Image (cartoon, rainbow, N blue to C red):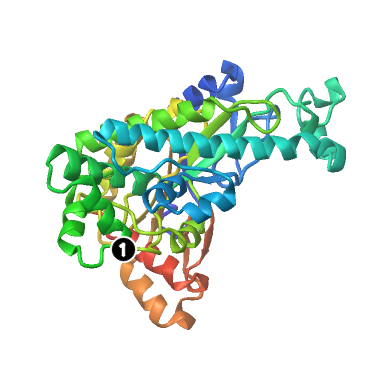
């Protein structure tokens, strides 16, 4: 009811998978049950740890560099991502994608450790450290390994676009044999110009968030593989690395700098937030998206933040019957293993009017990503994304 009254800051958190994720990451049962949500949505053990949040990792970037053969950029970075060309099977191509992701994770971890290991000598955190158990007992700063837990968190983004891209390659090139891998890669490298029919077919391949069993199974498998890759690395201060799926408005910033992808996305299009669907793939409605997300093993994420942001139009829950259906939907999502959920209730008509006549809607607030803001203060691209979110069924 608070959401219906305009509150756009409510986060629903599910204890079951959250506690399981904490246990998986090495916490005791007592610590897991006493978890804390900090910042926007970060899961943390109360008083015994603090993640270095904001450590975003764009898993779509090594895929893009390999696909588009961006040799100059890779040389400048000093990182090489193996090309996708010539893969004789989907499993061979997928193995290359995972290896390229491993290269990214390893370099990210190396750079973080190099900086983290000198932090206590140049920028110690004595007051912060005093708030954590064990630091005072050990007489060691947090940045010198004084805290009980020293894990790092990689917040991944690009998951929906990458899953849909891989599924499109699998279906069109290997399962159906509609096109050769070379033909599909050529079309993507041309930003789909002159290959509109192929692009339409790529976008019609059942993808993430549509409730398709094969797509859901692959998404869950990919998440498990990402988790395993992260756990191979050593964190900034010697702890584990856990993963989540989120970003803030970087989905626009990174999207503008990312070339076309096999899911039908053009050069520069915005990436999708968290575990939401890629643009143009929300044809099966909200239930399908939530069912897909529920297939991901949240305990395997290791207490990383994975938030689902949903904006509902007033037509969906304007009466008590539809309100109860919405409650049932959320309960089913949580019973199926969903962890976080953030809901904004706003009229699509109001959003459209606010975009056209902002002076009349200065009061209108919406949930953006990890924060709420006044709708009229957002840039046009983010406004359009929020308007599109209200098309859930």
**Which sits in the foreground, 302 or 173?**
173
Q: In this view, does 184 lie to the left or right of 296?
A: left
Q: Is mark 1 on a helix, strand or loop?
A: loop
The residue drawn where x is 71% and y is 30% is 237
Give the x, y percent position of residue 329. 28, 41
- Residue 163: quarter of image: top left
**Which sits in the foreground, 347 or 64?**
64
Mark 1 neighbour density, 10 Å: few (under 14) some (14–19) many (20 or more): many
**Any part of residue 37 in sight:** no
Number of numbered discs visible in the structure rendering? 1
Give the x, y percent position of residue 236. 68, 33
Q: Is residue 197 left or right of residue 270?
A: left
The residue drawn where x is 44% and y is 66% is 382
Give the x, y percent position of residue 271. 40, 56
**Which sits in the foreground, 386 or 259?**
259
The residue drawn where x is 76% and y is 30% is 132
**Which sits in the foreground, 274 or 127?**
274
Q: In this view, does 160 lie to the left or right of 71?
A: left
- Residue 25: quarter of image: top right
Give the x, y percent position of residue 148. 71, 22
Q: Mark 1 points at which residue?
A: 191
**Any part of residue 111 in sight:** yes
């Amino acid at each position: 009811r608070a959401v219906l009254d305009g509150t756009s800051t409510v986060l629903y958190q599910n204890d079951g998978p959250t506690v399981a994720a904490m246990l998986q990451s090495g916490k005791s049962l007592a610590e897991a049950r006493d978890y804390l949500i900090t910042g926007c949505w970060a899961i943390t053990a109360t008083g015994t740890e603090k993640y270095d949040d904001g450590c975003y990792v764009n898993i779509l970037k090594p895929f893009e560099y390999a696909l588009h053969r961006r040799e100059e950029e890779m040389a400048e970075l000093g990182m090489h991502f193996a090309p996708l060309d010539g893969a004789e099977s989907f499993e061979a191509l997928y193995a290359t994608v995972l290896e390229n992701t491993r290269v990214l994770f390893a370099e990210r971890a190396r750079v973080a450790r190099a900086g983290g290991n000198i932090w206590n000598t140049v920028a110690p955190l004595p007051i912060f450290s005093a708030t954590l158990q064990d630091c005072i007992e050990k007489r060691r700063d947090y940045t010198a390994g004084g805290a009980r837990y020293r894990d790092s968190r990689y917040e991944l983004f690009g998951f929906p676009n990458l899953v849909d891209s891989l599924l499109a390659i699998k279906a069109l090139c290997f399962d159906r044999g509609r096109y050769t891998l070379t033909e599909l890669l050529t079309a993507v490298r041309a930003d789909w110009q002159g290959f509109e029919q192929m692009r339409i077919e790529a976008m019609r391949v059942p993808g993430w968030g549509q409730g398709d069993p094969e797509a859901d199974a692959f998404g869950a498998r990919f998440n498990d593989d990402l988790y395993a890759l992260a756990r191979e690395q050593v964190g900034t201060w010697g702890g584990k690395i856990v993963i989540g799926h989120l970003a803030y408005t970087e989905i626009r910033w990174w999207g503008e700098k990312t070339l076309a992808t096999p899911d039908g996305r053009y050069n520069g299009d915005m990436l999708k937030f968290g575990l939401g669907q890629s643009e143009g793939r929300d044809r099966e409605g909200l239930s399908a998206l939530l069912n897909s997300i529920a297939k991901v093993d949240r305990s395997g994420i290791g207490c990383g933040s994975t938030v689902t942001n949903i904006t509902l139009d007033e037509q969906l829950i304007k009466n008590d019957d539809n309100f109860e259906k919405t409650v049932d939907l959320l309960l089913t999502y949580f019973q199926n293993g969903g962890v976080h959920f953030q809901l904004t209730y706003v009229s699509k008509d109001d959003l459209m009017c606010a975009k056209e006549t902002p002076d009349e809607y200065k009061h209108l607030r919406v949930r953006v990503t990890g924060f709420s803001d006044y709708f009229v203060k957002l840039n046009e691209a983010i406004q359009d994304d929020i308007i599109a979110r209200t098309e859930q069924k």
